[in-house]
Image: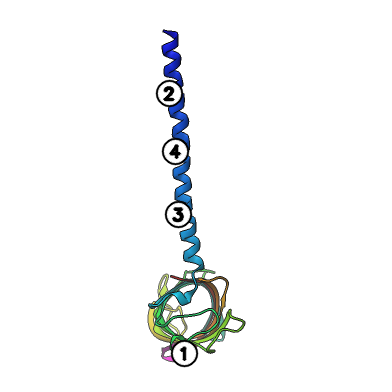
């Protein structure tokens, strides 16, 4: 009887030992597939993409709004999705791929007891200034955006003879010329900085300065 129990115990122990290597082997196979796939996605040169490329960017913004006799500072965030038709290369950008088009959205919440928030959405076109990035990484660019900038006033509107941004809830047409730099950190990741002049048209033309910096990812 004792011999039978001992045999069963050895069989069970053998099964548990054989199961552990099986799970370990399965984990190794999964890792062997997933890690190269991720590395391949992030390290594949952009020139291997033959179709349109998409770039997604998230960025931080600092605004200096044009208000009567002073400027009003606010901080916010935004995102941009751009499309480029042609193939890109690290060392050279084809002439027809120097242009990118897309959409953007930005938001600056109520802060510093200003009693208003700001939103800005629209379409944008970018153009690389140079045919090839400097040192294979640094690409100066210019852009032009068009869209709607709106303010959301918290509390009653302020009635003043001279228009001031934030006195009331209002939507305005905005043009946004800009200049920026795109610095490639890795194959599909880049750092971008922009200086923009957000021009609004309501009663009078106002120039709001915007400085932005963020990371963009080629999808």
Upstream in sequence: badge 3 or badge 2:
2
How far apart are labels 4 and 3 at the CA level? 17 Å
State the image coordinates of residue 12 (x, y, percent, origin top left).
43, 23
Q: Are dots 1 and 4 in contact, CB under 8 Å? A: no
Q: Which residue is mark 1?
A: 95
Of tags 1 and 3, the one toward the viewer is 3
Q: Which mark is residue 59?
A: none
Where disc 4 sits, the SS reads helix
- Residue 151 in the image, given as x and y percentages of width and height: 42, 76
Highlighted magenta segment, given as a residue range: 199-205
Where, quadrant-wise, is the C terminus in this rendering? bottom left
Q: Position of residue 132 (x, y in %)?
A: 55, 86
Q: CA distance from mark 1 to mark 2?
A: 69 Å
Coordinates of residue 216 in the picture (x, y in percent): 50, 72
Q: Secondary structure at mark 3?
A: helix
User: Which residue has dot 2 on it?
Assistant: 12
SS class, disc 1: helix
Q: Which residue is mark 3?
A: 33
Q: Earlier in the sequence, mark 1 or mark 3?
A: 3
- Determine the CA span between mark 1 and mark 3: 38 Å
């Amino acid at each position: 009887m004792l011999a039978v129990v001992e045999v069963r115990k050895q069989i069970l122990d053998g099964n548990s030992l054989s199961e552990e290597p099986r799970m370990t082997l399965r984990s190794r196979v999964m890792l062997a597939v997933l890690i190269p796939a991720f590395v391949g996605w992030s390290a594949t040169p952009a020139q291997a993409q033959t179709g349109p490329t998409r770039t997604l960017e998230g960025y931080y913004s600092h605004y200096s709004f044009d208000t009567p006799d002073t400027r009003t500072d606010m901080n916010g965030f935004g995102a941009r999705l751009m499309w480029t038709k042609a193939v890109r290369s690290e060392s050279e950008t084809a002439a027809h791929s120097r242009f990118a088009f897309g959409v953007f959205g930005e938001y600056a919440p109520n802060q510093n007891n200003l009693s208003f928030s700001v939103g800005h959405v629209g379409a944008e076109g970018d153009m690389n200034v140079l045919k090839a990035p400097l040192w294979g990484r640094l690409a100066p660019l210019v852009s032009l955006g068009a869209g709607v900038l709106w303010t959301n006033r918290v509390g009653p509107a302020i009635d003043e003879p001279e228009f001031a941004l934030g006195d009331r809830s209002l939507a305005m047409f905005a043009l946004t010329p800009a200049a920026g730099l795109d610095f490639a950190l890795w194959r599909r990741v880049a750092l971008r900085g922009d200086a923009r002049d957000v021009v609004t048209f309501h009663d009078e033309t106002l120039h709001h300065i915007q400085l932005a910096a963020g990371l963009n990812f080629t999808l």
